[in-house]
Image (cartoon, grey):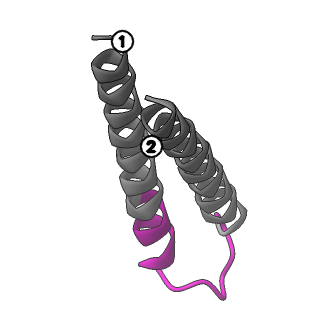
Amino acid sequence: MNELLDRAGRLHADADLMDGYARRLLATASALTGCALAPEWSRPTLERQAAACTTAARQLRAAAQALLAHARA
């Protein structure tokens, strides 16, 4: 059971990291707004990557919740 709890904790920590990556990607995309040197594709690409990180974080948290529910059962 402790292994499941540890794994759930690691999944939550990974989810937090993914949320942090998403925030940084969005900040970078925002910083590129109006920058003449940035390629046109860079901002939308960074925004898509941020969305993927947010989705991954949500999935990691769901997996952690499933492990916790299994550990309680």
Quarter of the image with the N terminus in it: top left
Give the image location of residue 45, x and y in percent. Answer: 41, 70
**Viewer-side residue, 21 vs 64:** 64
**Viewer-side residue, 3 vs 63:** 3
- Amino acid type of the residue tagged 2 in the rendering: Ala
Horizontally, residue 28 falls left or right of residue 10, namely right
**Residue 17 belongs to the span the image colors magenta:** no
- Decide: few, some or many residues near mark 1? Use Cα within 10 Å; few <14, some 14-19, many ≥20: few
**Viewer-side residue, 8 vs 1:** 1
Q: CA distance from mark 1 to mark 2?
A: 23 Å
Residue annotated with mark 2: 57
Residue annotated with mark 1: 72
Which type of secondary structure does the marked residue at label 1 adopt?
Answer: helix
- Decide: few, some or many residues near mark 2? Use Cα within 10 Å; few <14, some 14-19, many ≥20: many
Give the image location of residue 32, x and y in percent. Answer: 66, 69
Give the image location of residue 3, x and y in percent. Answer: 47, 40
Residue found at x 49% / y 77%: 42
